[in-house]
Amino acid sequence: MNLTFYNDEATWLHRLDPRTKIGGVLLIFAICLCFNHPLFIALILTGVLAIFTTAKSMKVLWKLRFLLVLLFVFSVVLWPFFIKGKTVLFQWHGLEVSSESLLYGFAMGLRLMTFVRAGLLLLATTKNEEIANGLIRLGIPYPVAFALATAIRLAPTFADAGATIVQAQVSRGLDLDSKNIFIRFKRFTPLSIPIFISAMRYTNFLAMALESKGFRPDTPRTSYYEARITGRDWLAMGVLTLTFAACLYLRLSLHWGIIIPGRL
Amino acid sequence: MQHALLMWKNTRMIVLTSVCAAIYAATLIAFKTVVPIIPGVTEVRVAGVFPMTFGFLFGPAGAWGLAIGNVIGDIFGGTLSPASIAGFIGNFLMGYLPYTLWSTLIPVANGTYAWDAKSVRSWLTYIVIAFISGAAAGVVIGAFADAIGMVPYAIISKIITINNFIGSLIGIMLLIAVFDVTKNQLRLFWPEVMDVSVANTAMKASLGAWLVAAGCILGVFGGFVPGLSWTAVSWPATCLIMGGSLLL
Amino acid sequence: MTSSIVFDHLSFSYQNTSIPALQDISGEMSRGSFTMVMGHSGAGKSTLCCAINGLVPRFLRGDYAGGVIVEGMEAGKNIVPEMAQVVGIVLQDFEAQLFSTNVELEMAFGLENKCLPRTAMEERIDTYMRVVGLEELRKRDTATLSGGQKQRLAIGSVLAMETPVLVMDEPTTDIDPEGRRHILSLIRTLRVGERTLVVTDLDAEAAVQADQVWLLKDGQLAAQGTPVEILTDSSLIESCGVRPLATVALFQAMNWPGQPLTVEAAVAEIESRRLICPRRPECRAISTLTNGKVILEARNLSYRYPSGDINALNDIALTINEGDFVAMLGQNGSGKTTLAKHFNGLLKPTVGDMLIRGRPVNDYRRHKLAREVGYVFQNPDHQIFASTVREEVAFGPRILGMDRKTLERNIAESLDATGLSGFEDKNPFLLNRGERQRVAVASILAVKPAVIILDEPTTGLDYVHQRDTMEMLKRLNQLGHTIIIITHAMWIAEAYARRSILMKEGRILLDGSTPTVFSDENMLAASSLAPSDLIRLRNRLGLAAMTLTDMVKELKSEAVPPGSF
């Protein structure tokens, strides 16, 4: 089963050091949190989409189109009821919607989409092993990164096994489509137990293979992938850091981009 | 907290972490509902039956496994966002609280890590802890999701709490079915893997257990008190839960 | 010759077990030699492998006596990562020893642990990727490799560590015939040089090329010697649960002189001694089952996976009669399983129709379908979930709404048919692989489906268990069930199936009675398959019989006195 969002191209973004990309995505997240006015967030979203274009990865977004639209609608519909603004549009049994809260909902919908897209930017241009390697170089202890990398390697295998288990139980007559809530609950047992046991049978083998290859959790080791920070990386980080600083200034000193004060 | 850090020196525990993470991620992916980023909005997920069993059987490996597994679910689902950080902490708690509270939450705890399907007390403890750990995740993830403008706390904290709780209640069937095999045949029960002979029953830990419980009650029911807004409740509740967890 | 591995009265029993896994093993393996360790499942092969690098007793705990010295290091006294300097081990389950998300990183893993500098790693990776033939897949995601490729990667990553001793535990289990051939030829390459090679396998045909064969039985070293010494003793190796070499068995049964280990040697022997006159293979009329009613029919069936860009099945036309015994053959990815999953409606054709008893699969409700066609998946752990065997077997019938009395009777009958009577209250998770396999079959059988499909029913089983399983299926077939097996084990298809269907790249390449299909070695070769040694010999000699007993009968009935012409 192939599940990754990685989009095999050779653009500048693909060539950036994984540390830069992880840091960069975190900075974009932070930039998004500076404003809650839809116009400002729309601007940030445009920026993210521009980067997507230069990374030749727009098609990755297409894969998640339904999710993105859903997230947006969800936010736009939900938030107005939970935020209080000055210009009340209508009131009904204690629920009130104001024009500010509508705008806020719209902004949050855009922000959520920007979050997901920024995350995809990392996933589309960075291989899983690069992410793990980047995390190690950012200071995560090796055993933790190893657990992450191995889990990424095993997840598709277990997902395949999960699909087979579903087929095996369906062949025996298990009804997966029932609308009855109790039948839905009952089906969990024949699915979850085989998933658990068949995976757990791996554990001891994995640990044995690991020790047999000379692995020790607390001794130093070398790394096959060497990360190289180049001028490009410094440039990317510099631009993003400056942007973030500028946004902080706009928000904190000039109070721009605020629809609902007191919220991120 | 001590075991949760020490385990990284134990090869078998590290591998268990990977396997738990992979199972959790695989079920999150394979049985993905439409809105994975807003956890469990539509229905109880198959993945929801695992946390209690992982936490109880594999202790710290279960906790880290759930935390990492949730991140991998986000990686394969394409939903990496600031909420992934909250998801990491919240899912960690869902695996961390079961084994820590099991020995420390007086009066339901009996001071050991043992599970006995025939004992009413074991069932009672399971149910209480299932609620607390589910709520802890709900409160922490909810507070964070609200703050960054993803979903209002009043909604998301309850949805996560209820979903986790129901998942854990169904999960008791899983625990009963696999406990013996995992402990006696596969030899993967965490106190034995880590050579922990005496359960943690220190006063400090019991205090932590109660702080966590108090935080959960505040976080789930506090907003119903007239004059208290949900958002106002969310952060003190989160602090109680996080602070209490560090004492465990 | 200096010795590389020395076993000194090694005994071991696992924690909480009473039966020892190894008993008083003593012996030497010299540097640069290739030793094949054989025996029934549970004979102690894996335990022996694990004792060489200290996993026994450092990881798998138990009572340990005696010792093993490997290249001067005592296995039990050093921790496993320390032993990794001298011993590389490829464990049984390749899926469980790959840790990395791409091929070259996997190759690098052991080297990183050894703290090799990057340039040295690169050199080694280049070298050993070429040895295992994966150089083109360097950047591939590990999860997307085929079973055979994963196994070669597992071997390559251990090879890269350049240990003087290399141990491989059943490296050819659970891969398709082409993958198996790759591994066997890889082993041939590896035995050159100073490397000490220890390999376990279930199949005697793989042992021919070894320097030494060790036979284990119930934890004891039953025999050790050269392949000629061991493999020519059919009764000895059969008593250890290993299928005897067909060539040797035939020569013994015919009382012919000579003990050839390979088909080529056997044919040469027969020709040179003029034991029988070579004849043109003649095709005799062999009864195939044509009297039964058609139960399954595929009409111009094509299928494409939702994520795929080529058809997994192409224009399949096929009918299967009630009461038949069918083997589906082909490499992984040839479409066997995809086609079989159409038989019970797990997959729906993209184009064309799948009919059961003349009605389209789509017309059947799920419950009805489960009563017509049962499907036993390859890995029994993918379906077992109940806490007793009885509960497990009752799951299907109960969900299909069978009444209590019928249910009880069906459970009893299916347990009886699978030889599991008396297992009712046992916990299925605690049974061994062969028994769990039978629980899976029983749980399908309890529904009494007309057709039973079994995906690789003999994988991971030794010869004795394979034969037991197949005899059970034969009985079920005699009771009227239509049996369809998907298998990589040629001898099983040859000996048990009435009809064989050969698939390649989503098409049916050849379909006919098993004797006819297996006479056509060119077609089999076209899908990278080869008959077993027995049938290759039969084809060379132009016989019609498909089993050893029948071949002997056939040869004796038209006995040509040796050297009469």
Image (cartoon, rainbow, N blue to C red):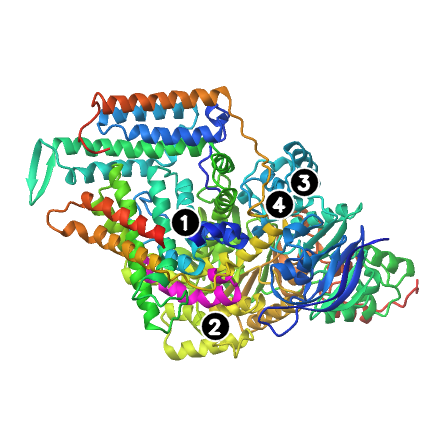
Q: Tell me which corner region of the image, top left, top right, bottom left or bottom right, holds residue C556.
A: bottom right
Q: Residues within 10 Å of mark 4 (few under 14, many from 20)?
A: many
Tell me which amino acid carries mark 3: Gly
Kindly indicate whether the residue at mark 2 contacts the one at mark 3 (C-beta within 8 angstroms): no
Horizontal side of A216 relative to C495 (left or right) equals: left
Q: Residues within 10 Å of mark 3 (few under 14, many from 20)?
A: some
Kindly indicate whether the residue at mark 4 contacts the one at mark 1 (C-beta within 8 angstroms): no
First in residue order: circle 3 vs circle 4: 3
Tell me which amino acid carries mark 1: Ala
Q: Where residue C66 sits: x, y (%)?
A: 73, 66
C352 in the magenta segment:
no
Name the residue furthest front. Answer: B203
**Highlighted range, magenta:** B166-192
First in residue order: circle 3 vs circle 2: 3
Above/below status of C411 relative to C344: below
Q: Residues within 10 Å of mark 1 (few under 14, many from 20)?
A: many
Which element is circle 3 on?
Answer: loop
Tell me which amino acid carries mark 2: Val
Q: Where residue C226 sits: x, y (%)?
A: 83, 60
Tell me which amino acid carries mark 4: Gln
Q: Where residue C99 sits: x, y (%)?
A: 55, 46
Most common secondary structure along the magenta stretch: helix
In this rendering, does residue C250 appear at all? yes
Q: Which residue is mark 4?
A: C149
Say the numbered circle drawn on residue C389: 2
- Which chain is mark 2 on? C
Say the numbered circle drawn on residue B153: none
B178 in the magenta segment:
yes
Which is nearer the eye, C56 or B75? C56
